[in-house]
């Protein structure tokens, strides 16, 4: 089974960089252009601050991937966005979430290598890695032999970006107030982040998680590698929260069977509805519009008072 989706459309996420600041419905945005790193290529980082942000109190921090898709549909390649500022402000007005700022990390042309979990890839045989590389080349997701760089991407977030945010903004620095969220490949890297850095991230929200890793399900070894990794590296449920979801249209149509296997692993590790949710949304597709429509669910789950 192959994914019938133009890879050029997916890669527009990486190539749609727009220097213009997004128009917000609420809050303010501070942009750090071409944030340099010794681990990954430079990229823009946007920090959203809610109305009334004050240095006299502390804020939780939500790190989000695909940062250029989060705030203003007028600036995105597909004219859709998560509208994170709208959703967070509404929830705060309802007094159901704690104070939070958002760190929106832009993607680059290396999106697939940045977001593809590295250690599960290393489980694969040489032949399996060659197969994955060939399929990603064919779809335009890589130009050379594929090698994930997600360990370096997470080092960038944990060792460079987080210290910068904590130094320059009024934040709670503990894991109980540090969260990570993304969709599709961003869902994979969010899952990987909480497994690799359980002392840094207290919760991860993984929307429409792209369990296939590639865009072809025929004899695809990647999902089993991801599930094997998840089984061996899930953080303890006592002090971590996990959120997963998916629809059943477009790319999301391929996720439910794999998500079901992931759910079985998560349940076996002792997670319950107190610290884990997996939601299914029949009729929903793989798009920012769909993620916007259900964004309030993981936000309330992670940020509840």
Image (cartoon, grey):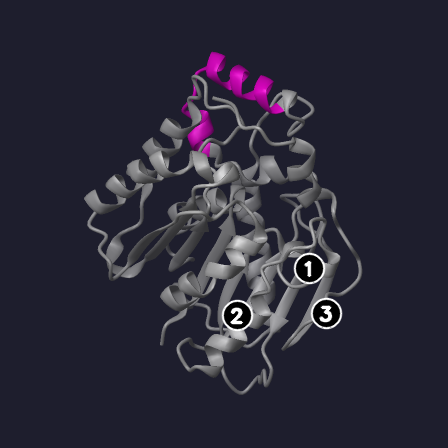
| Residue 2, x across and y down, in percent | 52, 23
Going 65% across and 31% down the picture, which residue do you hit?
A: 6
Residue at the disc numbered 2: 87
Query: Which quadrant of the figure has residue 163?
Result: bottom right
Lower sequence index among marks 2 and 1: 1
- Of tags 3 and 1, the one toward the viewer is 1
- Residue annotated with mark 1: 73
Mark 3 or 1, nearer chain start: 3
Q: In the displayed structure, would residue 110 be above or below residue 86?
A: above
Q: Can you tell which mark lies on residue 23? A: 3
Q: Nearer the viewer, residue 218 or 147?
A: 218
Q: Nearer the viewer, residue 302 or 294?
A: 294
Secondary element type, mark 1 = helix
Answer few, some or many: residues within 10 Å of disc 2's Cα (few below 14, many 20 plus, some between 14 and 19): some
- How far separated are the C-alphas under marks 2 and 1? 14 Å
Quadrant housing residue 304: bottom left
């Amino acid at each position: 089974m192959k994914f019938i989706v133009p890879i050029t459309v997916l890669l527009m996420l990486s190539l749609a960089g727009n220097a213009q600041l997004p128009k917000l419905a609420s809050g303010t945005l501070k942009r750090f252009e071409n944030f340099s790193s010794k681990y990954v290529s430079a990229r823009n980082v946007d920090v959203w601050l809610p109305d009334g942000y004050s240095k006299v109190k502390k804020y939780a921090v939500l790190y989000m991937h695909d940062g250029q898709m989060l705030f203003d549909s007028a600036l995105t390649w597909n004219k859709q966005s998560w509208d994170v500022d709208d959703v967070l402000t509404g929830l705060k007005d309802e007094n159901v979430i704690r104070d939070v700022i958002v760190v929106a990390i832009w993607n680059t042309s290396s999106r697939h290598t940045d977001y593809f979990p590295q250690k599960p890839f290393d489980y694969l045989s040489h032949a399996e890695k060659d197969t994955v590389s060939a399929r990603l080349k064919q779809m335009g997701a890589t130009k050379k032999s594929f090698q994930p760089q997600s360990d370096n991407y997470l080092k960038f977030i944990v060792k460079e970006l987080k210290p910068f945010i904590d130094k320059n903004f009024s934040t709670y620095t503990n894991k109980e107030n540090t969260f990570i969220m993304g969709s599709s490949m961003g869902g994979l890297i969010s899952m990987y982040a909480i497994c690799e850095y359980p002392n840094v991230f207290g919760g991860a929200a993984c929307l429409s998680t792209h369990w296939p890793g590639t865009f072809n399900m025929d004899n695809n070894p990647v999902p089993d590698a991801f599930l094997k990794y998840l089984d061996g590296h899930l953080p303890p449920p006592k002090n971590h929260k996990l959120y997963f979801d998916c629809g059943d249209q477009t790319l999301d149509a391929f996720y439910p069977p794999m998500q079901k296997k992931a759910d079985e692993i998560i349940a076996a590790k002792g997670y319950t509805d107190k610290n884990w949710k997996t939601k299914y949304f029949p009729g929903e597709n793989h798009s920012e519009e769909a993620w916007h429509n259900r964004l309030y669910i993981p936000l309330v789950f992670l940020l509840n008072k």
